[in-house]
Each structure stands twice: as C-alpha cells, then as structure tokens.
Amino acid sequence: MKSPALLWPRLRSVSRMTAPQQPENTYKVGDRVEHDTHGAGTVIEASKHGAVVLFDRGNRGNFRTGPHLRPSDTPVPRGHDAAECIIRLKRLQKRYGGEIHKTSPVGGHASIYRATVDGEQVTIGIGDDGEPYTYTIKGGRKPLAEPAELVWVNPAHWHGEQIPVRQWYVPDMIPMRQVTLLTGDGGVGKSLLAAQIGAAGAMCVETLGLEPWGGKVIYLGAEDEADEFHRRLADIAKALGGDLSDLHLFRLLPAADMDALLSAPDKHGVMQPTALWLDFADFAESYEPKLIILDTSADLFGGDEIKRSQVRQFISMLRKLAIKINCAIVLLSHPSVAGMQTGTGTSGSTAWSNSVRARLYLTADKDDDNLRTLKGMKANYAAKGGELKLRWQEGAFVLDDGKPSPAAGLLAGAADKVFLRLLSAINGSGQNVSPNRSSSYAPTVMAKRPDRDGVSKKALEEAMHRSLAAGTAAVITEGSPSRQRQRLVVVADEVKQGRAALLPTVPSNGLPTPSNGAAHTPPITPVGVGNARPLEDGRQYQANNDNSEPAREAA
C-alpha cells in the first residue's frame, strides 16, 4: 500500500481537473446591473472573476459573474455615485477618524466604522438624499454637517471679464449677501425702524430718504406678539401712503411665546443649528426674500457672547443663508453698558462688530423724546460715519428737517422765559453769572435753583444761546482794563435801569465790543426799544445815530 504522501499529487491533479471553470467578469466599476432578488445596482469593485455591487435598495452583495447579474439601464439614484461617495467619506474620515468599509449594514453607501463625533463612537454614512449622517443602534440616524470643499480661484482668470457690481438692499447702508447689525438701546425704536425699512421694501416705496430693494421680506420677531405687530405695521403702512393690504410680500413670524433660539452650543462649545433654524432656513429658501430681519440677538443667539468663536459661528450661519438665497440679513441687538457710555453701540464682545460687514447704531436724543439719530458705525463697502436724523411721528419715523416741531417750539419758548426770569432774579440778588464755562456758568447756577420749574441744565443752556441770538440777553464787560469780567444780563432790565450804555456796541469791524473804555463810541439800543432795528447781516443791534441826551432818555 502506498503512503498518503505519494497519493497527494494525484488527488491535487484530480481536484484541478474537476473544478468548474469560472467565466471572466465582463462588468467594470460604474456599470449598472440588475439582480433577480436585490434589484438594480452599481458595480463599485470589479476583478477578473467577480464584482461588488451597490444596490439601490441599500443591500450589498459580492457576486461572481454569471446568471446572477445582467446589465441594467435604470438611472443611478441621487447620491449613489460610488466614486464621489468614497471621496466624500475620505474627507469625513480626516475629521472624525474611523475605517472606511465598502459594504455597510445600514444601507445606502459605503460607510465609516468606528468614527468619533462629539465624543461618541458612530457609523458615518451618506443617505439616499445625498446628505451625510451618523448612526448608532441607540440613537438611530442624525444629520451630520459636512465640511465645505475648498474652491481655489486664480484671479488671472478674471482678466477681461466684467467686474460685478456690488449690490445693496439700501444703498451704502445695508449690503446684500451679508449680515448687518442694527444696535440700539432698549425702547429706542430698533424694531420699528427695521420693520419700516422692510415694509417699504415689500411695498416697493421709498422711506426716510432711503431706497430699499423692492421685493419679499421675512421678519422674525422674538420680542413682540402678533397684536403688537398688527398695530405697528398698520401705522407704518399708513405713513408709507398705503394700508396693510399692500404688505402682501411681507412674511412675519411672531415668536414671543416660543423658544426662539436659532443656534446653541453643543457639549463641546460648538454652535449647532436648532430645529427652528432648520425650518426657518427651509422656508426662506423656498420664499426667496430680499431681506430677512431677525429681532433680536438676545433671543436668537444661544451661546456666550463673550466667546468670540461662538459669535462668529452664529454670524457665519446667518451669512451662509444670505449668500445661498441672495438676500440681506439685518440682525437687531442691544449694546452693552460700555457701548452705550462710549457711544459706539458695541455689544459685550467685539466679535459681533468684527464679524459683520456693516453696523448701524440708533440713539435717542437726551432732551427731545421723539428725536433719533441713525449712525453708520461700520461700513466695509461704503463711507463710514453717515447719519440720519429721524423723528417719531404717529407710529412711524420721518426725516427730521432740523426745524422744531410745534411741541418742541412751545417747550423752547417756556425754557426761554424761565431762563430770563432766573437771570433777572440772579442779577437782582447781586450775584453775577457768566456765559463761559466756569464756577459761575449761568446754566450751572440756574440748574441748582428750586425755582427753575424742572427745566434741565441743557435746556437752560440752549435757552441762553437763543436769548443771546434774539437780543433779549446780552453779555457786558465791567471792571478796569487790567481786571475785566463778563456777566450775563437781561437787556430789558438794563434799559429799565438806565444802563443801556453798558450793552455791547457794533464798531466798524462788525464785532461787538464793550462801550466802557471807548467813550467815543455811541451806545446802541436793543432791538424793539426806541428806534433800533436789526441789521441786514443778522446782528441784533443798530447803533443810534442820535447821541443827544433827549435820544438817550427816549431810549
């Protein structure tokens, strides 16, 4: 009997002779094939005798060629480009680690096993909609943000092409495809101003001397209820020459009664969009507005404004939407205490101002409750420092022409009377007050008196300037040439006391000088007293040509 070792070559030869011959694979990567059980799919790997197929229904199989597969003319579903899938997964692998497997139990595409996202081990795949996701048995599928692909530009290729014109929602104030920050103290009227500009755009009309881009507008208001917006927009539409029916291009989302956060940090401090933002962005993409107004950052930003990275991530999220749908976004915000004190209007972090390309600051006047000033604090694409004077009037803003309103005129007249009364009383008590800033500065002294009828120091200061300009008050200079001093007087009191000679004179050079020390200069008479009349150049006194004693007595 022969040993088994001697039989081995013969058995190997018999095995070689009886093994069936496999046909060569006729498919290559990218070919569309069909299987009787699994349906249509795409070849993602090919060898001499077999192929790995990515089926459209998410199953995979390693099939040898033969009766199992046959050619298919069905189109490739969206997101099933195998080569592109592998490229995208490799980019995700660089960020999250793990191993790429060309077969996956979760269906769809090749997947990354044992990747780490937010400290959790997950499987990363690309869904049938072409969007990446993470998968765990416990948590199921969750969307995953995909890093943007770098797009390199060679500026030399722009040579000879027409330079694109920069687009503005409001020329030189609110740029398109960017985020503009509108800051202002609480109650100053930020929401009203933003709504008025947006309503003018929706109605395709001008407002406040501005020409907004006519088109659709979206307003997300997190501070007011629908009823308040109803009243506000009714006043605005009326001020713009229309009514609420003209706001058919305006879409409002009142969010005072809901959690209005658009973005919040995850456990690693990275800002993530909320469900509200995803829904909001979906609507904006379908509605295609030219302006989006977000009111205000305190309600919409869920991060720490002191952390610059979180602020910049939030602004970046807004900017991406502005670029994607070609619109302008105006974000309303409150300034910090330091921002109000310095007059810059900045918030708690400079990242707010640094992250946007335009910033506006709305301030209120200290003495006129209805007056506002809108300043351009930052403008990367236009001149900085422009400002508008606005006045609140019947529920909307109008341009202020510098002329006092009837109410302001009445207040100014009352302040003038108080100033002259106080000045007369002070001089009657033997105290002297000065028009110059010092310890005896007239408005400062008057502001400390209990009989000032509540008139503020600033209002008294303005009344002093008006009285001097009108000639009802004057500055006289007394004392020797070496120790002269000036004091304010009421002109009518000086005339009544026979001291008109001490009032200012008008020499040949047109500049008022004291009459004492210039005996040859004839005295002057205040306007409205005797035969005095105002000069054509606006000076308030006319020299009396008759220097006789009777003329003085008549004066």
Image (tube, grey):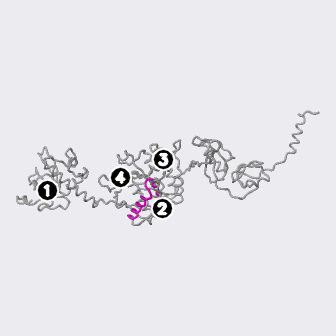
Q: Would residue 186 appear left or right of 441 to someone viewing this image?
A: right
Query: Which badge, 4 or 3, comes first in the chain's sequence?
Result: 3
The amino acid type of the residue labelled 1 equals Ala
10 Å crowding of disc 1: few (<14), some (14-19), many (20+) = many
Question: Is 233 located above or below residue 8 in the figure?
Answer: below
Labels 2, 3: front one = 3
* Circles 1 and 2 in contact, beta carbons < 8 Å: no
Q: CA distance from mark 4 to mark 1?
A: 40 Å
What is the x, y in percent for residue 504? 14, 54
44 left or right, relative to 430: right
The circle on residue 363 is: 4
Q: Which residue is denoted by mark 1 in the rendering?
A: 492
Mark 3 lies on a secondary structure that is: loop
Dot 4 or dot 1, earlier in sequence: 4
Pick the residue in front: 320 or 223. 223
Nearer the observer: mark 1 or 3; the answer is: 3
Per the model, the C-alpha gap separating discs 2 and 4 is 28 Å
**Residue holding disc 2:** 216
Say what secondary structure mark 4 lies in: strand
**Residue at (59%, 41%) from the top-left corner?**
120
What's the magenta region?
213-239
Task: Tell me which numbered mark, 2 or 4, is placed earlier along the sequence.
Answer: 2
Q: Whole-Å distance between the Cαs marked 1 and 3?
A: 65 Å
> Amino acid under label 4?
Thr
